[in-house]
Image (tube, rainbow, N blue to C red):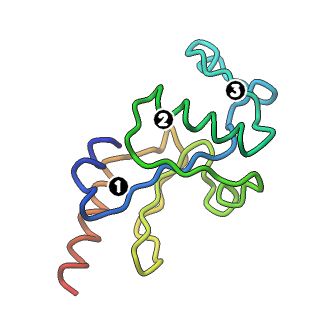
Amino acid sequence: MEKLYGQFQDQVEFFAVYVQEAHPTDGWQTDSNVAEGVLLRQHQSFDEREEAAQTCSIDLHISIPTLVEEMDNAIDEAYGAAPERLYLIGKDGNVYYHGGAGPHLFDLDELDEAIQRMEATVKVS
């Protein structure tokens, strides 16, 4: 994702949106999270969610601007964001790309192609 961000950041606004925990310690914890030391409970407040988002951005060296979802989880519910999802939304509000549920259907090559198609369409118009 960082590679795409570096390549297209002058043409496309990128945001990571931090949503509720997909595999919290007080919910459906996965063995891989335990092995990797990703041990976060479900956020009890916005401040706690914001702190987790900051920690995630720092630990994973994410330079993409990160937004933090409100506690109502409206973005997660509207976009099926958890555990991770890629979207490309044009300035006109149209969805140009809606990726599959991550991590298994998280396809950065598809997103790259969608950005290039969208950019070509914008240049032609």
Q: Residues within 10 Å of mark 3 (few under 14, many from 20)?
A: some
The residue labelled by disc 3 is 40
* Comes first in the chain, label 3 or label 2: 3
Provide the secondary structure element on which disc 3 rests. loop
The image shows residue 116, relative to residue 52, as above or below, that is: below
3D distance between C-alphas at marks 3 and 2: 14 Å
Q: Is residue 64 left or right of residue 40?
A: left
Q: Is residue 9 left or right of residue 72?
A: left
Residue lying at the far top in this picture: please name it. 35
Residue 108, horizontal then vertical, whole percent: 35, 47
Residue 78, horizontal then vertical, whole percent: 66, 63
Kind of residue indicated by mark 1: Leu
**Near-viewer residue (17 or 101):** 17
Q: Which mark is residue 121?
A: none
Kind of residue indicated by mark 2: Ser
Q: Is residue 120 left or right of residue 68?
A: left
